[in-house]
Amino acid sequence: MYKIVVHPGSAHKDDFLSVSVLLASLDRVEAVYRREATPEDLADRFTYVVDVGMDYNEQLHNFDHHQDSLLPCAFHLVMKHLGHHERATLMFEWYGYMSMIDVRGPYRTAEHLGIDTGVLFAASSPIDGYILSRFSKLDELKRGDLFYALMKEFGLDLLAMIERKYKRLERLKAEAQVVPVRHLKAIVSTIAEDPKLSMDRYIRYLNDKLVAMSITPSARGEGWEMLRLGDNSSVDFRAVADNPEIRFVHANGFVAKTQTLLPLEEAVQLATQAVTPLESFWLP
């Protein structure tokens, strides 16, 4: 039977995520304690000490980073221990920056990203704030507690999502097509289940600046969804809004949906009509 010890006081994403994936990964966890670590905790292999204790020792299951400025956040240390770090880095854009914020702080992270710090604060979620606030108020969590179950379920879902995204990326590499739409390119995928899953990872894998839209089955209703990528100014689906095959075009022109899954060649032709010809930019 395992125990987990994390720091008391204000909770952060680092300790919350660490505990969640440990609850999802360990066979039986008796309890989670939010307190300072004791020497006995640090010496006990059956006690996972996370984000507290001033010690990083994987064999003894101590995962603090505060004593060494070169270490990543505790969550990364735990994920490395569990064997998920490399795929999490590949699958989640937020993964690396989450550690940077925890280790270096929001101001240096914003400087690294080339943005104002206010942007980071504005992007913070009230959902995150509520959950972390609830975790902060607890001294311990035991099997059977609702919050224990929530954190374990969250951890299970996070680890499962890594594998789902990885497998989907490999499938996109094997099955997706990249087709021309005038002077640009479109990604075409016929995968109907969760059609947008890992599309951002596939776009990153392609690393092709000419890829400006995706054509996938719609996740809401029948038909194809044609989506502008990267806010490319050459793509505006309002140009095909009057076509009888189109059932929806967003008022800002970044997405359009067809009535049915018409033949793929016809969908690509429709998408092509939404691209402003290159020569139009040269006209006086």
Image (cartoon, rainbow, N blue to C red):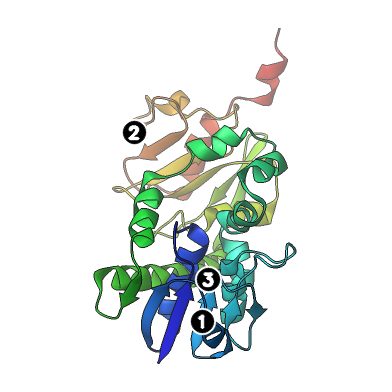
Q: What element carries label 2?
A: strand
Residue placed most toward the observer, 138 or 224: 138
- The image position of residue 83, as x and y in percent, is 59, 79
What residue is shown with label 1? 48
Classify 10 Å Cα crowding around label 3: few (below 14), some (14-19), many (20 and above).
Answer: few
Q: Earlier in the sequence, mark 3 or mark 2?
A: 3
Give, as a three-letter code, the residue at label 3.
Lys
Quadrant of the image for the C terminus?
top right
Q: Is mark 3 on a helix, strand or loop?
A: helix
Residue placed most toward the observer, 38 or 250: 38
Give, as a three-letter code, the residue at label 1.
Tyr
How many numbered callouts? 3
In this view, the mark in front (3 or 2)? 3
54, above or below 102, in the image:
below
- The image position of residue 89, as x and y in percent, is 62, 64
Give, as a three-letter code, the residue at label 2.
Phe
Q: Which of marks 1 and 3 is nearer the N terminus?
A: 1
Label 3 to label 2: alpha-carbon separation: 31 Å
Residue placed most toward the observer, 180 or 55: 55
Q: Residue at x 59, y 68 (%)?
A: 74
From the viewer's perspective, tell me whether residue 139 is left or right of residue 189: left
What residue is shown with label 3? 167
In the rendered structure, find residue 248 and report the number of the disc placed on it.
2
Q: What element carries label 1?
A: strand
From the viewer's perspective, tell me whether residue 206 is left or right of residue 259: right
Classify 10 Å Cα crowding around label 1: few (below 14), some (14-19), many (20 and above).
Answer: many
